[in-house]
Image (tube, rainbow, N blue to C red):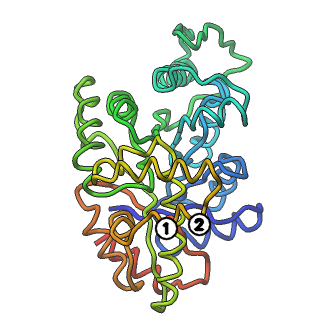
């Protein structure tokens, strides 16, 4: 199992420092997230300060961008990282698309599938020199002149991961993608009973299987050098679970464990702005289902025991930072690899 980290830095200087530290300490990959900052720029900086780790987005929001713009960004990152780039995409929810990005939100799974195929058509055009011919319901790409075409690259097959929760998007990923970003709100039971079977259904449509896909997640982990530190992180994660589970998109995860009624309660409290009340709805039983807790020297083994045979890559939802506890982090990485 590979052990990754989110890039816990924002300034250009700190991204460079974080990258050198993360690769040197033994991480396998660096993920850049799209929250308050662009997800691609940190990877361009990291590509110049690393030689081994994978560099990917987890995730970039798909629909505010178009296939050709994404294709150019990915092509440059792939070329300048010597084939280490992974494009991670997500649909986001309707409200964010329409009100934060001012883009339509129609048939998101179908549209995302088409976007992926359109990007690959652009990449194939650049690599082979053939004509660009892609005509779908949402995207029509029929012109690419030499002036706007980049040079061929050594690693033209750029892996594409997609994030999601429900069965429809998982089947799409199984059919046309290379990997799946499993939402941090997950459990081994949800993976075994819902998500992986949906991925396998999609994979069979394309003559593939689960082994053709890479599954990655940011694991919710509460750890530290004292019981007080662990307890404090557990409360942080309890609040985060309440926030995630208040969105109806994630209701299937709760339903797997027989907690369907909690989803409705959380949604109502979120609408009322009762954030403290949301956290109180998350019992210790629920917290333990979605979160690994324990001293640092136990976390790597617990990650492996929890996800071995289910996931291929893990990172921590609450990442370590340079100098925070390098010895403990090395132990986690070694135990996860083992």
Residue drawn at point x = 38 percent, y = 82 percent: 294
Q: Which residue has dot 1 on it?
A: 280
Q: CB atoms at circles 1 and 2 under 8 Å apart?
A: yes
- How far from the left and from the top, in percent, is residue 333? 40, 74
Pick the front one: 235 or 103: 235
- Which quarter of the rendered picture does the N terminus lie within? bottom left
Pick the front one: 59 or 230: 230
| Mark 1 element type | helix
Q: Which numbered dot is residue 291? A: none
Residue drawn at point x = 36 percent, y = 44 percent: 252
- How far from the left and from the top, in percent, is residue 139? 58, 13
Outermost residue toward the bottom?
226
Q: Which residue has dot 2 on it?
A: 276
Quarter of the view holding residue 221: bottom left
Residue drawn at point x = 65 percent, y = 37 percent: 96
Q: Residues within 10 Å of mark 2 (few under 14, many from 20)?
A: few
């Amino acid at each position: 199992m590979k052990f990754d980290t989110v890039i816990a830095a924002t300034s250009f200087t700190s991204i460079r420092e974080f990258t050198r530290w993360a690769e040197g300490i033994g991480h396998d990959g660096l993920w850049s997230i799209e929250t308050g900052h662009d997800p691609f720029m940190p990877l361009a900086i990291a590509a110049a300060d690393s030689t081994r780790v994978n560099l990917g987005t987890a995730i970039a929001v798909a629909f505010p961008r178009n296939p050709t713009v994404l294709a150019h960004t990915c092509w440059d990152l792939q070329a300048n990282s010597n084939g280490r780039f992974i494009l991670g995409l997500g649909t986001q929810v309707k409200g964010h698309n329409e009100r934060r990005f001012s883009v339509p939100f129609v048939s998101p799974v179908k549209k995302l599938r088409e976007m992926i195929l359109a990007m690959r058509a652009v990449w194939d055009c650049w690599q082979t020199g053939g004509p660009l011919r892609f005509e779908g319901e949402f995207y029509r790409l029929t012109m690419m002149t030499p002036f706007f075409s980049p040079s061929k690259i050594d690693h033209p097959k750029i892996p594409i991961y997609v994030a999601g929760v429900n069965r429809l998007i998982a089947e799409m990923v199984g059919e046309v993608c290379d990997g799946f970003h499993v939402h941090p709100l997950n459990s081994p039971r949800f993976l075994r009973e819902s998500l992986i079977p949906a991925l396998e259904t999609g994979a069979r449509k394309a003559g593939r299987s689960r082994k053709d896909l890479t599954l990655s997640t940011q694991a919710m982990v509460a750890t530290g050098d004292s019981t007080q530190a662990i307890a404090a992180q557990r409360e942080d994660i309890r609040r985060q679970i309440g926030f995630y589970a208040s969105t109806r998109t994630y209701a299937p995860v709760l339903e797997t464990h027989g907690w369907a009624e909690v989803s409705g309660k959380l949604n109502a409290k979120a609408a009322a702005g009762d954030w403290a009340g949301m956290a109180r709805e998350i019992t210790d039983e629920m917290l333990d289902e979605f979160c690994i807790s324990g001293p640092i020297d136990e976390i790597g083994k617990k990650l492996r025991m929890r996800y071995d045979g289910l996931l291929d890559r893990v990172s921590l939802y609450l990442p370590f930072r340079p100098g925070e506890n390098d010895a403990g982090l090395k132990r986690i990485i070694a135990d996860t690899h083992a």
